[in-house]
Image (cartoon, grey):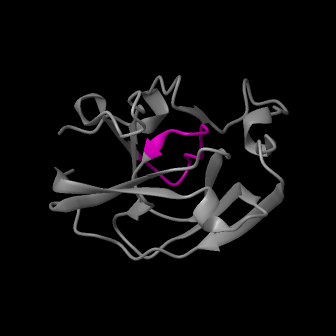
Amino acid sequence: MSLPPLASADLSPFATLVRAEGGKFTTIPQVLEPGDVPGQHAFAVLCPQPVDPQSISISFLERHPHSTQTFVPLQVGRWIVLLAPTLPDGAPDLANIRAFLAGPEDAVCIHRNVWHAGLTVLDRPAEVGMMMWRSAAGPADDGIVFELKAPIVLSV
């Protein structure tokens, strides 16, 4: 699967690029969208290790039915954004996966209930800020994982 750059992507209806419009102060309401269950916003710094860019294997997808999830690179090289729509039965629509190559300047807010790969970085260890709504019922209430029967294999 060839990976176009995230910067040139039309991500709707799956996600929103997080960037200033026209070099001016820009509000991005999706980032702070409150969840539809009791809880609070949480901010964490994730520290993923790089994978081999010639053999990227995605073995699961996740979605968050009650929250958007925003990734803001702090220290990162290239990274992968992989998104999939949700079928009526709740499973990911694997026939309509979109994958993009993001860079250190790219931040993205993945919309509520959109299937996506876990944070996958290339080139070097990374630090990425992540914000989402955390359900008061606990992470299991808003983190649904789908194990793939066969991995999605990408290369860049």
Residue 35 in picture, x, y percent from top left: 76, 45
Q: Nearer the viewer, residue 90 or 152?
A: 90
Please report the residue visible at 83 percent of the width from the left and 33 percent of the height from the top: 27
Asked if one can make out residue 125 in the rendered structure from this viewpoint, the answer is yes
Q: Is residue 24 left or right of residue 76?
A: right
User: Residue at 70% of width from left, 57% of height from top?
Assistant: 131
Give how far across and how far down residue 2 sits, in percent: 20, 37
Residue 65 is a magenta residue: no
Residue 145 appears left or right of 97 = right
* Residue 74, above or below 32: below
- Is 106 covered by the magenta stretch? yes
Residue under the point 81% across and 43% down: 34
Image height of 45 relative to 65, above or below: below
Q: Which residues are magenta?
A: 102-115
Is 102 on the left-hand or right-hand side of 35?
A: left
Looking at the rendering, which quadrant does residue 1 occupy? top left
User: Is 8 on the left or on the right of 60, as rendered?
Assistant: right
Camera-side residue of 125 and 153: 153
Residue 88 x %, y %: 41, 27
Where residue 115 sits: x, y (%)? 44, 43
Query: Looking at the image, which is closer to me, 142 or 2?
Result: 142
Q: Is residue 28 visible?
A: no
Residue drawn at 16 percent across, 53 percent down: 153
Q: Main secondary structure of the magenta part?
A: loop
Q: Is residue 95 above or below residue 136?
A: above
